[in-house]
Image (cartoon, helix red, strand yellow):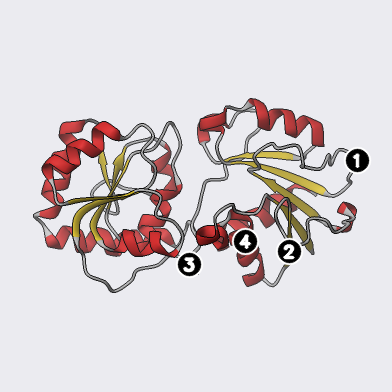
Amino acid sequence: MKILIIQENGRHNANRHFRECFCLQRGFQKLGIESTVWGLGHENFNSSLNFNDYDLIINLENYGNGWEPNLSNVKSKKLLWSIDSHVRGETPFLNEYSRGKYDLLLHSTKDFVNEKFKTWFPNAFDDTLIFPIETEKKYDVGFCGSLLNRQNYISLLYNEFNFKYDNFVIGDKMVEAINSYKVHWNRNLSNDINYRNFETIGCGVPLVTNYNYQYDELGFVDGENVIFYRNDIEMINSIKTLLNNQEMINNISKNSIELSKKHTYFERSKLVLEIYRNLN
């Protein structure tokens, strides 16, 4: 079986190897399946490809700069994976789905799954890059990510805790940062379940995040492998309770590592193959 993964190359050297296309490629490699990564910025971008040479083409989360090929006449099975419809809206992906005559549109956010687009394909993490590191827990609470809509929450955390905000810390440094927290705080941007959730449990660091119904089907259980909050007061009190109970921290850490095994790119690669088989 031959798979082509289409995605623009990463724009930052520090985390280029964390790009979804390479993570999926490593997942397929574990399964003994050949896959090629191609797109703007990759060394092979100017090489001529015969798209029909591939059994499956996966187009995932490109920026819409006009370089993406029109696959409408390609006979291979074709999947389009939308990762950030919660930010950009559905329209760009629906347009590309129609233009390229894709077989299936995969959404990482369950809210966008409907009768026509029935497949939920959640985010994941690469366990070859993200894992627990033996390091000093320098901070009671940390947040590694972009500010966006989180300013008020971060101010609260600074006032209440020994808190560290790691802004635009990416790649291997991100993994080091997450491992330096006793607790990793998160707030999803919208109705998504962002990568930070999976990266955190992959590091075995207790995750404190705002509740979303999608967590239930993903195996996140409040008090067992995650701590959920629904408002500011609950957020602060939950973190205080956690920090005052080392046994609870240890249990959530252990259970989160166990949960993370279900959310690796290796597991998502197996899901892709299942989807492919169902298309035939």
Could you say where residue 73 lies in the image, as x and y percent from the top left?
91, 40
* Three-letter residue code for mark 1: Asn
Disc on the earlier residue, 2 or 3: 2
SS class, disc 4: helix
Q: As rendered, which of 209 and 142 lies closer to the eye?
A: 142
- Residue at the (72%, 68%) spot, across then down: 33
Q: Are marks 4 and 3 in contact (CB under 8 Å)?
A: no
Could you say where residue 217 lies in the image, as x and y percent from the top left?
44, 43
Judging by the rendered image, the residue that carries numbered circle 3 is 129
Q: As rendered, which of 214 and 154 lies closer to the eye?
A: 154
Judging by the rendered image, the residue that carries numbered circle 2 is 35
Judging by the rendered image, the residue that carries numbered circle 4 is 22
Going by the image, does 20 lie left or right of 55? left
Mark sitting on residue 144: none
Disc on the earlier residue, 4 or 1: 4
Which one is closest to the eye, mark 4 or mark 1? 4
* Three-letter residue code for mark 2: Ser
* Three-letter residue code for mark 4: Phe
Judging by the rendered image, the residue that carries numbered circle 1 is 73
Report the Cα–Cα distance between label 3 and label 1: 37 Å
SS class, disc 2: strand
